[in-house]
Amino acid sequence: LFPDAIPECHPTISPQMYHTIMAPISLAVILALSFLVKRRRLHLSCWNGIPGLLSPGNFLEQDGHRAVAAAVFALLFSELCRLLLDPHPLPLLPPPPSPSAPPSASPAAREFWKVLALLYFPALYSPLLACAGPRHRLGYAAGTLLAWGHCGAHIWHRAQCPLAPKIHRLYSLLSHVPVLLSLSLLSLWYPALLLRSLRNRDSPEPRISGKSYYRKYLKALLSKRGQKGSSVKIEESLSSRIRSYLLSYVYIPEEGFRIPLKLVVSVTVAIIAVYQVAVLLLVAVVPALRIVRAGMSKDVVVLLVQFGVVPSQSPAVPGDMEQELRTARHFLWALEVCYIFSLVLCCLLTCAMLLRSLGMHRSNLRALYQGAVLDVFSKAHILRPSRESLVCWMAFSSFQAAFACLGLLIQQVIFFLCSVAFTFLVVIPLQIGTSSPLFGIIRNMWPFWLTLVVAVLVQHLLAHFQFLEQHSLQKEITNRRALYIVTFLLFPTNVLVGVMAAVWRVVISGLYNAVHFCRLDISLLHRGVETFDPGYRTYCHYLKVEVSQCHPLLKAFCFLLLQPGRPEPPAPPRDTQLEEGLQLMHPKHPAAGRARSRRIRARWWVAYTLLHNPSLTASRKTALADPAANGAQLGIPRP
């Protein structure tokens, strides 16, 4: 339990040596893949000028490798959590002579190294994500070597030095679990991509990336499943409603729709953030409580008895204090149980809210794809990218992780205090048979509580039986004189009832906001001032960029335009000896009819995507709003 008891560990590959080797290799891989991207994407003979810029991922496309992107972002966030708590954040610098030695650099210098580390780690791990961008076997091979190098170094270091004196001896190992899982996934994923690329060497690369998804989306949209069913409303039972409510917190993928890559990365990083914060809260508090409970002595118990914290039969004349010592240790054990219970509850609630937000993301994206802007936003918005929307789109995943961290901390404080209050005011007094302050308040003030309950019940009964009269179509107020008298007489009582209602409002609003704090798809403010909510504003601008740039119907339309046309068979030669009437009656070949039907179907799909694309609504002319402009002949213009 004590950090000083952990012996010093000197691994074979130190962190400084590991980063000194891997940083130049990562830079060399980036430069080599830049030439590969330039040669394959620009022109085959384009060797003059600057090499191509290698992108870490196509975040606005549906063809990206989601597992690779999620793993790299989880790895990057885990390193961010480590460097924020590490007194030596930049591993390229020489380490101190011993882990327990005080840092030689000043606090300002350490903050400067942290700023450099914020830029260093994205540059170090960006090749792990960029190797999948060119979709070439050389990129997959480079990604395999990099993933194996990173994973082997981390596993070897954890195997040699599993314990560390920072915060807790197991914190370093537990915080590196997402790092090891991410690198293990990359070490398996890149070889699989390389083998598949070598197996499909002769198959050509598709001209349009992600076209299979856009075809599936268009087919699902045009299928018969979207037809309206019976308008008769079926009454659901209570169990079915409860089942539907619980299933709303489980994201079930649907055919024909795919969550954007940015949302997948955001939810993955948020779950990793929940894990990292939970591990930090667990190892920072629970071992300290156990140390205090193990070191509890009779002298400390005497002091606690004098302050009234620990109950005693004779507090004025202390005896052997054995019973009081066991009671104090039991209190500390109950405090530890409350802390762990509240932490587990907060983690489950946060993960449930994140999964619930996935369903809301899908509903909002579908509504915006159909042009139903008012179903998502409180007022009309133009779905076009802007400066603010682009900045919010870039920061969306980071905001989701930060909000998940802070939301978990707020929930932990609230639920821990509530569980401690319930345990020490209700459970422990009933367990040891002593009086509780809560029970004393309820016992001494029972006439007050009974008066409030009776006043509320009387008002409801009078309103139902005396002050409302049922007519044929609606209810009307009657006995108004008695209504005015009761209103005046119960005014002081209703003030006290209002105080209780105000307390309940504070409690329920605090719990609701704390539980839903990690969700960016809903605003914690009123609809009139929801723009002051930075999380919800970021989410709204993210939706604008995502819908305007990644609309599946627009992508399907572009795919249909870029689809190569099929050459039609040559017309048969005409017989000049036939009559003129017979020359006009050419037989219809079935092949030509099938080609014509395919051409008509493709043109109809193009027209459908153009008409139902909300991104093009603002760009259309006002004349198209007239029904006569859609294929009908226009008459003489009105003066």
Image (cartoon, rainbow, N blue to C red):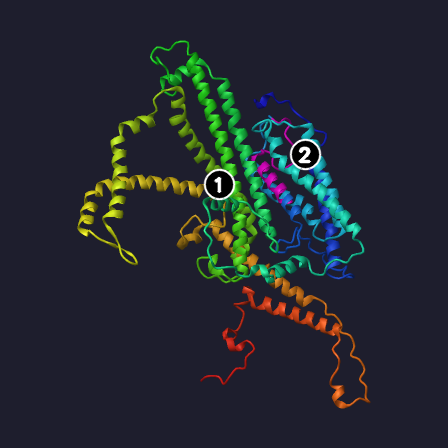
Q: Assess whether residue 93 is covered by the magenta stretch.
A: yes
Residue 407: mark: 1
Which one is in front, 432 or 462? Answer: 462
* Amino acid found under the numbered disc labelled 1: Gly
* Residue at (79, 77) in percent of width and height: 570
Q: Assess whether residue 85 is covered by the magenta stretch.
A: yes
**Looking at the rendering, in which quadrant would you find the C terminus?**
bottom left
Percent position of residue 149, x then y:
73, 39
Locate residue 287 relative to residue 30 in the image: left or right. left
Q: In this rendering, is residue 208 above or below 345? A: below
On the question of residue 495 being in view, the answer is: no
Image quadrant assignment for residue 101 = top right
Pointer 2 with pointer 1, Cβ within 8 A: no
Specify few, some or many for label 1: CA neighbours under 10 Å numbering under 14, 14-19, or 20 or more: many
Q: In this rendering, is residue 326 above or below 482? A: above
Q: Secondary structure at mark 1?
A: helix
Percent position of residue 566, x then y:
74, 70
Q: Secondary structure at mark 2?
A: helix
Tell me the magenta residue range: 72-99
Q: In this rendering, is residue 560 above or below 332? A: below
Percent position of residue 47, x then y:
77, 59
Q: Earlier in the sequence, mark 2 or mark 1?
A: 2
Mark 2 to mark 1: distance in Å?
33 Å
* Amino acid found under the numbered disc labelled 2: Pro
Residue 15: mark: 2
